[in-house]
Image (tube, coloured by chain):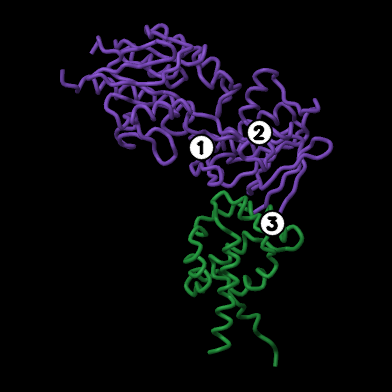
Amino acid sequence: MNNKHVAVIGGGIAGMEAASVLARQGLKVTLIEKQANTGGKLNDWDHLFPDFSSPDELVNSLANKTKDSGVNTVCNTEISRIERNGKRFELRANQDVRFFADAVLVASGFNVFDATIKEEYGYGLFGNVITSVDFEKRMKKHGQLHTIQGTAPKRVAIIHCVGSRDAKVGNTYCSKVCCITGIKQAIEISEMLPDCEVFCFYMDLRLYGSKFDSLYLQAQKRHKIQFIRGRLSEAAERADKSIQIKAEDTLQGRPLRMTVDMVILLVGMEPGVSTSQLIQKNQMTVDENGFLKSANMHCARNQSTQEGIFMTGTAICPMAVNETLENARSAATEIIHFFENRRP
Amino acid sequence: MNDLSFLKPASRQIDFDNFDDRLLLYVLKYEPSFFTCISCGGCTATCSAGNLTNFNVRKIGLWLRRGETEKLSEEIQKCMFCGKCTLVCPRDINIRNVILLIKKRIAMLKNENTTA
């Protein structure tokens, strides 16, 4: 097995974790990342839920692990094609770069939902409507939140399910991590700006993780975050750049309107664009949501419908950071089993 | 004679054993998408009639699913058929058509009652 070569496509946390596990087992591993650095989307995040830990620390420790285990990391290289050649694979990248491998692991991640598609929420039109990703980027860069007028917001509305569970944008699935992200960001705002009122507008709160409900409780108890059960129908900008939003307070059974200084849209996860390129050329199949389809969702989660091609992380479905890392280790195990069981 | 009806007040319970499904079955036959409603209230938030009167389009759907025929037939007159509810529905339900079907069915049932 030791002379086998695995190519990992995508240098986000899933790819890094799987690559380092495989390399520690003695396999030759090449980790291929299209951007200049590994770490993927986590490079833009300020804090992780539910423990407010630092993504930088995680990314750095993964980078050290991949380096120490002997993974060959290649950045600025985007794979556009995987070709099967007998039992081996030939991967083609931009220009004339080629890689050869005995197994391929696709860890190409997700795309963030483009909130401009939900025109009625005014993202891209109104300066004080931002996304949860913008929030993370701003917090990381400036360490503070202010409106487009430069003032500290006194009232913020956080909108759940933007681009998720919405037949109108073609995504009927739940992105799973947005509910808890919203609660985490609500707490961060309240800690930073104690006088700021924070409202979360939700359809259902899906706090599935073991520590998620305690964060919800903390948001209510300690931070007085208010939760309103109703889906936003529209947002409009007023002359002073504040935003008027409309929803139904479904528990009261009456329409509600509220003027806020800022709106944060909790944008969901969509299948990665780079993934779709790989699918077209490699007969990999996708599930009903457009994510990569597993050979069996229970006992072969990381096997694609093509023998020798595996996948991991949010290329399969929306996942939290801890789930992604667990999934990456499970993918590495499946690849090792694949080599062990293969007839010479 | 004293009125003693307060000793046996009408029940406030929703009675699923005596469910009036005459409206619901008709609506589901012609607009099956209605079954997927999750009561998010997007429709009510955008409703033109609901911003002026106490009309609540989400509750129309709820009453329909609970067989509250009498409440429905009065409330539904307030709808102006602007169709904004249908535009915002995340489940892609043709709510405007649901209201239209309820009205049609009520008219049919009234007709049956008067001719019978």
At mark 1, the secondary structure is: loop
Q: Which residue is mark 3?
A: B47
Amino acid under disc 2: Ala
Report whether A298 appears left or right of A139. left
- Quadrant of the rendered structure where residue B82 is? bottom right
Report whether A132 appears left or right of A314. right
Query: Which of the pair A288/A132 is nearer the observer?
Result: A288
Q: Which residue is mark 2?
A: A186
Query: Which of the pair A121/B5 is nearer the observer?
Result: A121
Q: Looking at the picture, does residue A161 appear above or below residue A57?
A: below
Report whether A175 appears left or right of B57. left
- Quadrant of the rendered structure where residue A145 is? top right
Q: Looking at the picture, does residue A323 appear above or below residue A340?
A: below
Residue A189 horizontal/vertical position (percent): 69, 30
Q: Colour of chain B?
A: green
Amino acid under disc 1: Ser
> Marks 3/2: CA distance?
29 Å
